[in-house]
Image (cartoon, coloured by chain):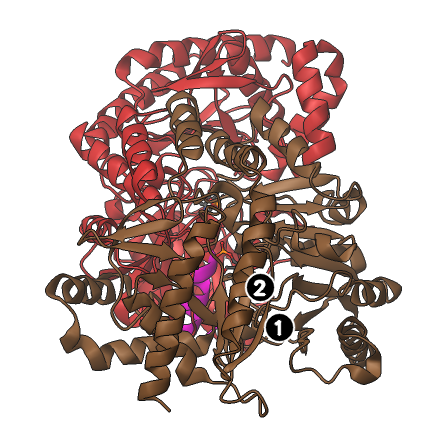
Chain colours: A red, B brown
Amino acid sequence: MPTRSTIMDTNSFRAEHADALDDVTRELTAKREALLGASYRLFYRNPVHVVRGQGAYLWDASGRKYLDVYNNVPSVGHAHPAVVAAVSAQMATLNTHTRYLHGSVLAYAEDLLSTLPGELDQIMFMCTGSEANDLAIRVARAYTGGTGIILTSEAYHGNTELTSAHSPALGSSQPLDPAARLVSPPDGYRADWAADGSVGQWFAARVQEQIDAMREQGVPFAGLLIDSVFSSDGVFTGEPGMLAPAFDVVHRNGGVVIADEVQPGFARTGDAFWGFGRHGVVPDIVTMGKPMGAGMPISGMAAKREVLEAFSLKVPYFNTFGGNPVSIAAAQAVLDTIRGEALQERARTVGAELRASLTALADRFDVIGDVRGAGQFTGLELVTSRSTKQPATALALDVIEGMRERGVLTSVAGPSGNILKLRPTLAFQSGDIDWLMESLTDALVQALETRP
Amino acid sequence: MPTRSTIMDTNSFRAEHADALDDVTRELTAKREALLGASYRLFYRNPVHVVRGQGAYLWDASGRKYLDVYNNVPSVGHAHPAVVAAVSAQMATLNTHTRYLHGSVLAYAEDLLSTLPGELDQIMFMCTGSEANDLAIRVARAYTGGTGIILTSEAYHGNTELTSAHSPALGSSQPLDPAARLVSPPDGYRADWAADGSVGQWFAARVQEQIDAMREQGVPFAGLLIDSVFSSDGVFTGEPGMLAPAFDVVHRNGGVVIADEVQPGFARTGDAFWGFGRHGVVPDIVTMGKPMGAGMPISGMAAKREVLEAFSLKVPYFNTFGGNPVSIAAAQAVLDTIRGEALQERARTVGAELRASLTALADRFDVIGDVRGAGQFTGLELVTSRSTKQPATALALDVIEGMRERGVLTSVAGPSGNILKLRPTLAFQSGDIDWLMESLTDALVQALETRP
Ligand SMILES: Cc1ncc(COP(=O)(O)O)c(C=O)c1O
Ligand SMILES: Cc1ncc(COP(=O)(O)O)c(C=O)c1O
């Protein structure tokens, strides 16, 4: 989810630049507004009209090729043949709900649970990340008897009423849940953590403060819900172990931790299969989605049995499409492909190589404030100058527009929208780094010339 | 969604009958309980282990063929080749989110909106019926400024926190939204409607009562949310026009009507493409799901532009998988197939033929209290005797178990679980009626012998 600043700015820019669009783009854009309404937002002043994808690339209607550095759903690569074959075969055979017995959902459940810490021993399937988080919040509340959930200040967790009320990224027109409390993310670049010893200790202290505030205000504490790489807060992967103190604080206070792995999950962070894996911690509930079925709408919620049962022995839950054989076939093919092509290892090495190039580029540009990340999840923070660290919001927007003109698709994150979120498919290889670096360098040069 | 009575009873029956299961069934059942947890419920004392589907039929692992009289998702028929081909081709080409331009989502939006009254001129796509209703409730509240939603007493509208709180069918362990109010469905068989002139007038009066009660209690009225055939209340299709008085009452009181078309939509009721279509009414919001993509998780929410804008100009909404090219390809293939194979007309004629056979059967069995429905959505109400109308709950369960043993799959609905819900795929033909009638007759005879 891009931050609100991006969404709004990109849209108003397009209205201003409508004259510059070609006829088909203008027609499709107008049709979208008429038929789909105001919630449908497009990326870029000059939107991309995509027609084909393969591996790390997309092609537009004119045949132009793009490097996709943003799309974390087709994580194994666009139109991966193993996924296409698995889905096609299963669709031609059977697709039905989980009220009958079917073997593949059980084989996949077993396989997927084997990637998680042993304590997380049950899994349920739904269709979207929002559904997974909606259920996770309900389970956390049922288990703890509390209502209060702690969130990071720019978090996005979903589009349902409950998850939207736990998504401060949506802005002030979407009221937060009255029991929700916000903490700053573990921002190693900006947070004043020295006195606490480490960013992780600093973050844990912030969590403890909110638990204490809840107690004073009579709100019973339920837990901490975090994206384990803080994607929309600005990509804070941190040092291994960073999250351990906060997990301890939550557990000492009787709460549960929900790790939202919708963005970092499925090998993206390279060092581990799950985003929390780098920190040696065990969440009580793990939610997952986006890359899970390579575009097939499938999501999941894994939990400790005892936590889940507090809900599931009481309240009925049924999801019509959740865990159907076709979605499961896609998910199994994704899991097999991640292993078969060693995509976790590739994410680790190619991501590190990319960050080395970006760090080298920082020698040339004082506006590059920070380069951080893990595996194929990189945050590149742009500032007006390294000494003031003032967010360079307008510059970041110019840069992503400039990269788009050079065929490289990416976007921004963070409360000020000044952090480039470089999050390619895991099909991205070393050989793709040059195109990315060239487009970034040229876009930076051009943007700094026009906006000094 | 089967009623809670069914779910619970079927599960406890299985525990009692575990000895009678074959080894594979017992193993798969145990594995489900271990890996997937308590929310996963199976149909039947002896669950069906499905491996293949085609048209109106399913096959189990032993090669046995079943007639599917319950599955409304693969409405164009299991594994329909047009859907398989469309999905396979699109998957091999491109699958991505709606932040880029893509033509097919717009072509489909236009096509789908053409099946709805002209006032409903905008459509948004999500992945599940629950997501569609969750958003619909939020939109209704934003537009009216109210919070109170009126629901029928056994309604099911979804599994998210918000929709579960608007689903009395889930039972007392799931608290209702404090602003929600219940009305009895327009039950022409049981309601005492004579004094009101018609079931429709009777139902409208019940809705008005709840609006008045809300007003007294200081709850601002937002609208009426109904499944237009009242599937889980017990299938009340009613006479054409039945819903008009209630729609009038809602509109006169400043509320909106949300028609939940997740079950009746997409030609099932035969006389019309949408369930509300038989009644000459125009809802303000229409939600849809299940049959929309023949198993591909896609759902939609259509609304009057002015109603939708009250929400969408204010609150951001993004659904990662919603409206992606693969889901749209499935949905377009479904729409084309419904038209190309004239499935609406088939639903009308074959459904009428089936109800004629069931009505004839009622001459033989005093326990058949009522036969009702429209198109391929039939309710067969079982009672202990026609004079008392007492619900024959245990008998109904025995009958669906007996039909399952004879290869015909169906289930029950209604607060007492005594109403057989006969809801085959639209691939069901005249020639399938015999198997259904024979299995029903034999199961009734056997059940009445063992449970006099
Ligand atoms: C961290 C995170 N959680 C949850 C979601 C919601 O996922 P979905 O759009 O599939 O409902 C998103 C989607 O952007 C996300 O980024
Ligand atoms: C009338 C009705 N509305 C909504 C839903 C929820 O749909 P889903 O399971 O796709 O979320 C259902 C599902 O059973 C339904 O029957």
Asked if the residue at tag 1 contacts the one at tag 2, i.e. Cβ–Cβ closer than 8 Å, the answer is yes
**Subunit ID for the residue under disc 1:** B
Q: Where does the magenta region start and end?
A: A134-146
Whether residue B39 is visible, yes or no, is yes
Tell me: B313 left or right of B152: right
Quarter in which the C terminus of chain A is drawn:
top right
- Residue wearing tag 1: B177
Please give the label number shown on residue B162.
2
User: Which of the 4 image quadrants contains residue B49?
Assistant: bottom left
Q: Residues within 10 Å of mark 2 (few under 14, many from 20)?
A: many
Q: Amino acid at mark 1?
A: Asp
| Position above or below: A431 against B404 | above
Q: Would you say the beta carbon of the disc 1 residue lies within 8 angstroms of ligand 2?
A: no
User: Which of the 4 image quadrants contains residue B275?
Assistant: bottom right
Tell me: A32 left or right of B396: right
Residue A142 located within the stretch drawn in magenta: yes
Q: Nearer the viewer, residue B70 or B408?
A: B408
| Position above or below: B213 against A25 | below
Q: Secondary structure at mark 2?
A: helix
Whether residue A143 is visible, yes or no, is no
Give the x, y percent position of residue B173. 47, 79
Give the x, y percent position of residue A430. 27, 15
